Amino acid sequence: MSATRRCFLRMAGSAAAAAATGAALGCASPAAATRRWAMAIDVRKCLELDGCRACIDACHQAHNVPAIPDRAHEVKWIWKEPFERTFAIEDPDTVTAALRGREVLVFCNHCDNPPCVRVCPTQATWKRDDGVVAIDEHRCIGCRYCVAACPYGSRSFNFVDPRPFLVHTTSEYPTRTRGVVEKCNLCEERLAKGQPPACVRACPGGAMLFGDLRDPDSEIRKTLAARYSIRRKPELGTRPQVYYVI
Amino acid sequence: MLEKALAGGRRYWAWIAGLAAVACAGAWCYALQLQTGLGMTGLSRDVTWGLYIAQFTFFVGVAASAVMVVLPYYLHDYKVFGRVTILGEFLAITSVVMCGLFIFVDMGQPSRVLNVLRYPTPWSMMFWDMVALGGYLILNVVITRVSLEAERNDTAPPRWIRPVIVLSIPWAISIHTVTAFLYNGLPGRSFWLTAILAPRFLASAFAAGPALLILLCLAARRWWSLRIADEAIRKIALIVAYAMAVHVFFVLLEVFTVFYSQVPEHVDHFRYLYAGLDGHTALVPWMWTSACLAVVALVLLIVPSTRTSEPTLAGACVAVFVSLWIDKGLGLVVGGFVPSPLGAVTDYVPTWPEMMITAGVWALGAIMVTGFFKVTAEVRAGER
């Protein structure tokens, strides 16, 4: 079912409150197909909250992401990486002091031209009309071709059964089995209800901005117009839709 | 016709039994892997493909190499290869079956593997690899079946088989090209992002495959008195020599491009493989072994006297095979993953069960090749 149709049905059938927020997010009409969700991270605001894990915890709890201690078998949807690694900077000494050695948030970029989608042999991962790169974990055969194709290391494979490693289990979202790939889904389940992603909602500093890039009046467009932003490996032509406002 | 593989002496059966035992041990380890998941292997978040996919890649090459005996015989009417083409094709069948098994044991959800057929995805190279390998398997099964039948009945093969055989020639090239495309279409993996990859795959395949074929021919000649002319073996040795030289040349082209341009994300993979990166040196001894064996092999193959004498030729073939097995069956896949897109350097060391599963597939392949060569030997013994 397409995003448009799902939004439309929810709009038609469910509560007015959801409809109101849905309208605010742009999931309100069949014209939702023309939306293009994107995320902007205000890196400085994020860094002010040193050691904060609010978005990570919120995401991982909302999606039953296991806490596997073995780094080799780790599953993660959103996490922090050193700035230099995130942007493949060769000479860390020349990075501005405010960012040097500091960590920034990384997660799926929901690329406009996603290589993971191109390579998947079963169409178990695909790009929706609204830009969300989604996964059907029930169709995934676990070949890990998408993991090889992702230039950002955003995808995790369930090397072991994830269920024994769940800290809090929520019934709102499915758990996964071993042998399938998973990653950030931009909270498609929340978008369908007209809510912003869990990480955005959880951020205490307002450092994560989510919105529709096709709407010239959206807050994200205004922020990107006003401030300098960078993206991860734009030279690869994947057109990532997560912007880092510096 | 396959029943002819059942006529063997005690040593023959002891060999088969030994291989079957290894295959069973592999199957047992695979049962373990089914229960615990791929976490049982040495694979990790950063190195998500390892021994299995590397073996797959290597054996696609061995499969494709049949073309090196088929092409001269059918397109150039090079009669000396008349008695070895079928052996090359049997080796191809075996290799494709092994490839399928290596892919299968690598799947996280093997029960869903038919999803590839249920949702055919023409923009995925894995789909085309399946089409190419499946087609190649069918072609070779038909070709060997018909050719051997004709040989047994001492008749000429039916005319319709010739276009099928001719079709198998470009098809062989295609299987390894598409396998290279699996790797070199990925934007973030600089190690594979090079147009020389497919030619390099083909060159190494046309060295490793025929080298293995020579070793098998020498063995079959000794143990089952399968008649294979010295001239045929010498000619295949010449093919190995050229292919190995081209392979080394291609690798050096890559080395120049990478190190002269000095683009870090290209250099890092080579540094990891040949010098180690951030203190991680797991593959360094392997890669240098491969490089040294390549040089030894080249010398033995280029000098005419060592190429034509049987013991040194056998040594050269072992050197070629081992060198390229390390290069492609280990370095090429793992090297592409280290460093990771986020710059992490993670060594990959296969676990024992993982190696046992791999050995099990090898053993199955050895059983198949033994059986096929046995059948051929029996059919030809009947001619006399």
Image (tube, rainbow, N blue to C red):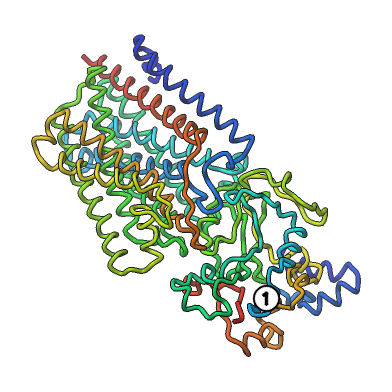
Say which quadrant the N terminus of chain B sits in. top left
- The residue located at (57%, 39%) in the rendering is B40
Say how many tags the image has: 1
- The residue located at (30%, 47%) in the rendering is B288
Looking at this rendering, what residue extends furthest in the top direction? B10
Looking at this rendering, what residue extends furthest in the left direction? B305
Locate residue B229 relative to residue A133 in the image: left or right. left
Locate residue A219 relative to residue B320 in the image: left or right. right
The image position of residue B96, as x and y in percent, is 41, 38
Q: Is residue A167 above or below residue A97?
A: above
Q: Quadrant of residue A229?
A: bottom right
Q: Is residue B258 visible?
A: yes
The image position of residue B271, as x and y in percent, is 36, 58
Q: Is residue A36 visible?
A: no
- The residue located at (68%, 77%) in the rendering is A48
Q: Quadrant of residue B142?
A: top left
Chain of the residue that carries numbered disc 1 in the rendered image? A
The image position of residue B98, as x and y in percent, is 43, 35
Locate residue B82 relative to residue B27 in the image: left or right. left
The image position of residue B240, as x and y in percent, is 21, 41
Say which quadrant the C terminus of chain B sits in. top left
Q: Quadrant of residue A20?
A: bottom right
Q: Nearer the viewer, residue A149 or A78?
A: A78
Label 1 element class: helix
Q: Nearer the viewer, residue B373 or A93?
A: A93
Crowd tier of the residue under label 1, counting other residues whose Cα lies within 10 Å: few below 14, some 14–19, many 20 or above: many
Q: Which residue is mark 1?
A: A46
Q: Nearer the viewer, residue B50 or B184?
A: B50
- What kind of residue is marked 1? Cys
